[in-house]
Amino acid sequence: MHLLHQRGPLHDLPDTPEAYDTVLADVVEQALARLTPEGNLEHPDCVDDIGDTALGITSLLALAWQRGKDPRLPEAVHRSLDFHLNERVYTEDNAGYPNLRVRNSGLPYARYTLAAGAHPIGDWPSTVWALLQAVNVLDAADGLVDDEQLSRLLDVARGYWRWLTEATFFNPQEAGNQAIGCVVGGLMLAAHLPGPEGESVRARALQLYTEKIRAHRVEDRGAALPPEHGGAYDNNYGPISLSFLAQAHRVSGEEIFAEDGEALARYIDARLTNGGFDNGGPRYSEQHSAFESVLGLRYFGARIGADLGRYRGDSRWARHAVKADGGVDGHFAWMLVWQIQNTTRWHREPSTAIARHQLRAGTVSVAFDTRMTPAVVEAAGTYYLPAAVNRQHGFGPVVDGFLLCRPMGEVRVRDVRADGLAAKLVTKPVVGRDHVLRHIQSLYVTDGTSLWVTVAVERLPGRPYLLAGLPYATDDGDRVLRTAEGEVTSAGELRLTHPQSEGAHHFDARAELTQEQAAFALAADPRGYGNPDEGWRHLVSSTALEAAPAPGAPEDLHVFAVRYGPGGPFAPAFERDGEVLTVRTEAFTARLGEVAGDAHGEPVLTLSV
């Protein structure tokens, strides 16, 4: 079974001018065949996300005319622009819309669905999208759109901006991508307005970004991020926000957008596996955007020197939004326009910078969460998520059903590169049910093909084991598939267990249910509105790899040793010299300094082949 939305890496899509001309040529032919006598370019099956779609197709036709001067396009643009201005601009308040600050303003807006009161909650982002489609048409209007239409369109775009920023609350869905998109619309609109008015709109856009978006950023894994639907980051919408930041920087030149975009890009690079898999978010866990992410990933990947294009997108939306039959939909068309206009090339080499929340080399990667517990482990093409036991989630030692991975104090990290190896030592203070403070040393070492994990902790009572992950997905090159197995070897006994109980609170990796589906089943609100991250935290138990303590450890320690990925026999040896623990495997020798660290309390690690 495939994960629906995680397909090929986005940098695999051809992005030459010729490739984009082919895309636009297809859009043109579809649009001309679809154009109704009234000038409607909407897909026949379009019901929601509809208020901006015809104008989006119009903007693509305008761009195609700019690039190729197809003589069929001026009339199509004229008719379709008339349709939007006459049929899709609403000025009467939508029944039931909850976010108005001014009733009966008479300002224009775009509807999420056409029927009054049917689903008004989406009118704010639909109006943002319509503003962006409008300014893209204005940008391409020279020699294509007559003065009367141009004046009407500019008035509507100005009205959209005022409705978004005066008649309604700003960013009512707490969605960073929508909010930054609105700012971009204001910045682009300002260029079409006369001097003082243009400067006023530009200043207001920058003020909204500073006071309403930037001032409310949320921290995750050490990065300050634009909040997305009430959370820090969503793996579908986060890269879309990155694209908006790229466009904001392109059209304004303001350094604040470059600074924040680079911070978000470094965060994405750290959380993204080598193979491009990612999961988690307050709106979607596994759904991935596609062409909407390309601009930001390409633009900021080049700026920070990272291969962000490895991000796996939904190739069904490889170039533009489509309906179930594959027909073009104008929703998000502005991002295709900007993607074509921007000529930044993909940066394809991994960043060489050491990142606290990532270990990556070759085909192996570990993405760590804020607490420096692995969020995703990747080795030999398999992706492992944190497993769940007794409502506790993570990687770490388990004693009497209690998982020791939540820190009680500062987590300290040391990175070392030596002889083709990359290593990260994490020292974490934890407290168990017995209220005893213990320090766990977790060593992650990779040669780019396999990953060795060694976890040392003072001897635990009972029969402890290492919760070593939930094998969840594998990579066949073109698609991400579900799995319930992985190539893992342990120095002690290794068990792959599955939940003994059934039901929504128990996740069996052998079942067809995806992580996102399971998470939404446990969320407080319906799919698309609930928080899958919060829902997933309600999981009681899951499929899990459980590794018994390794033999030959010093008497006062429990040491767990696991290898993810290929290799021959695995029989690590351990020696204790005072407070220094030496770990020897078939691939390396590592010396872990005393738990207290050096004179500044920082972990000490030496590594050699």
Image: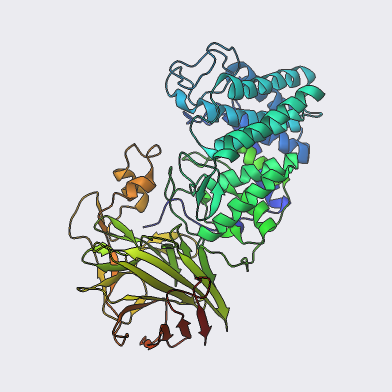
- Does residue 25 appear in this view? no
**Quick check: 6 left or right of 241?**
left
Which residue sits at x=67%, y=44%?
257
Residues 575 and 295: in front is: 575
Residue furthest out toward the left: 501
Which residue sits at x=76%, y=17%?
148
Residues 507 and 59: in front is: 507
Quadrant of res 334 = top right
Residues 478 and 540: in front is: 540
- Does residue 558 appear in this view? yes
x, y (%) of residue 98?
A: 45, 21
Query: For the image shown, how many numbered marks are present on the structure?
Result: 0
x, y (%) of residue 113?
A: 48, 24
x, y (%) of residue 247?
A: 68, 42
x, y (%) of residue 581?
A: 41, 83
**Location of the N terminus (image quadrant):** bottom left
